[in-house]
């Protein structure tokens, strides 16, 4: 694949030159295989099709000003995929195999890592699926772990510009104590109806409230929610939120900046008290929020048409580490040799 217009890439699927894959059979993982095919062959009764045995991850590789390619916090993605595998009873991918696959697939597709000044990056999508045939609700006896990559632009078309969110109380992203805290496809399927309605009404995403009481901020559809209140970085505490590696990193950076980090329940009424609000995740990094519309109560919460100063500082610091422009004191990045 050849790309000439790096700066106008959207966020979507593009076939890369290569992907990597391996099978778990007879209780063990086989060697990594390199493929140039974008297809896989599975039994028609594979558990991924019938019982939702599937998990995935998302991370990125960045080309720095120095020409080096850096992958951000892939060890944390490995741990999160292991938790997802435990949650839906799949074979876990060891961290060593996960990181080997990431390094290999990025190196194989090195020409597709966008240039430093393009604003784009190489998105990495590891996936783990039940490949064994079962009719009857039980785990598969075979699994496929594969990693695909593609160059992407910003997740939200606005990029690092404030967007609008909407609250609809008639939809839940995930049930309390369900699969919300792991990264499985069913959570995203469940969000499509509300997400489509939001897009049709001019909003970038839905801001979900907790499914039990509809009193507290939960998650922002495809990303975690955070807010700035005075000198505090505030993020929701919930059993149904996917722990974002970006959010984890931003909490550390906020602490390094001398801010108080609060991980707690956030009453929806507190939206009126925040100075800045944002959504964060691998795909979006930080998406500042200019307005949240509570559709059920016809209420608006406004935060300004430009990114707030704390959002800007956090965004620049995190991006600086990802691109090798800032010191990396915690060893978050891995250089692909």
Image: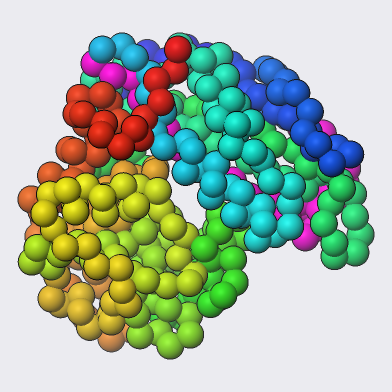
Identified at 59% across, 66% down, the residue is 179
Position of 50 relative to 237 (above/below): above
Position of 268 relative to 222 (above/below): below
Residue 273: percent from left, percent from top: 13, 76
Position of 288 relative to 277 (above/below): above
Position of 78 relative to 263 (above/below): above
Position of 334 with respect to 291 (left or right) is right
Total numbered circles: 0
Q: Nearer the viewer, residue 126 or 334?
A: 334
Position of 216 with respect to 131 (left or right) is left
Q: Nearer the viewer, residue 76 or 40?
A: 76
Q: Which quadrant of the structure image shows residue 188?
A: bottom right
Q: Nearer the viewer, residue 174 or 236?
A: 236
Identified at 47% across, 43% down, the residue is 76
Identified at 77% across, 60% down, the residue is 51
Residue 284: percent from left, percent from top: 34, 45
Q: Which quadrant of the structure image shows residue 41?
A: top right
Residue 16 in view: no
Q: Nearer the viewer, residue 97 or 229?
A: 97
Image quarter in which the C terminus is found: top left
Q: Is residue 162 magenta?
A: no
Q: How is the image coloured?
A: rainbow
Identified at 24% across, 57% down, the residue is 278
Q: Which quadrant of the structure image shows residue 25?
A: top right
Residue 17: percent from left, percent from top: 58, 16
Residue 197: percent from left, percent from top: 44, 66
Q: Which residues are magenta?
A: 40-65
Residue 124 in view: yes
Q: Is residue 47 magenta?
A: yes
């Amino acid at each position: 694949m050849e790309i000439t217009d790096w700066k106008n890439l959207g966020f979507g699927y593009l076939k890369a030159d290569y992907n990597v894959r391996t099978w778990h059979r007879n209780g063990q993982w086989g060697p990594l295989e390199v493929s140039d095919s974008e297809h896989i062959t599975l039994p028609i009764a594979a558990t991924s099709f019938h019982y939702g045995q599937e998990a995935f991850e998302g991370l990125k590789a960045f080309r720095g000003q120095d020409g080096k390619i850096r992958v951000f916090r892939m060890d944390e993605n490995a741990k999160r995929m292991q938790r997802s595998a435990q949650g839906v009873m799949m074979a876990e991918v060891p961290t060593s195999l996960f990181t080997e696959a990431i390094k290999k697939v990025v190196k194989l597709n090195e020409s597709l890592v966008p240039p430093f000044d393009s604003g784009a990056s190489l998105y990495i999508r590891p996936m783990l699926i039940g490949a064994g045939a079962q009719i009857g609700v039980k785990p598969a006896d075979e699994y496929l772990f594969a990693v695909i990559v593609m160059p992407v632009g910003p997740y939200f078309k606005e990029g690092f510009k404030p967007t609008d969110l909407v609250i609809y109380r008639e939809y839940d992203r995930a049930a309390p104590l369900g699969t919300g805290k792991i990264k499985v496809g069913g959570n995203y399927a469940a969000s499509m109806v509300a997400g489509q309605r939001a897009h049709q009404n001019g909003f970038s995403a839905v801001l979900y409230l907790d499914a039990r009481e509809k009193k507290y901020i939960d998650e922002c559809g495809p990303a975690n929610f955070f807010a700035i209140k005075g000198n505090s970085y505030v993020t929701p505490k919930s059993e149904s939120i996917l722990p974002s590696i970006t959010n984890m990193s931003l909490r550390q950076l906020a602490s390094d900046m001398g801010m108080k980090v609060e991980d707690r329940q956030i009453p929806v009424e507190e939206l009126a008290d925040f100075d800045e609000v944002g959504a964060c995740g691998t795909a979006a990094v930080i998406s500042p929020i200019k307005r949240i519309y509570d559709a059920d109560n016809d209420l608006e919460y406004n935060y300004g048409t430009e990114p707030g100063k704390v959002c800007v500082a956090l965004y620049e610091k995190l991006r600086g580490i990802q691109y090798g422009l800032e010191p990396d004191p915690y060893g978050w990045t891995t250089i692909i040799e």
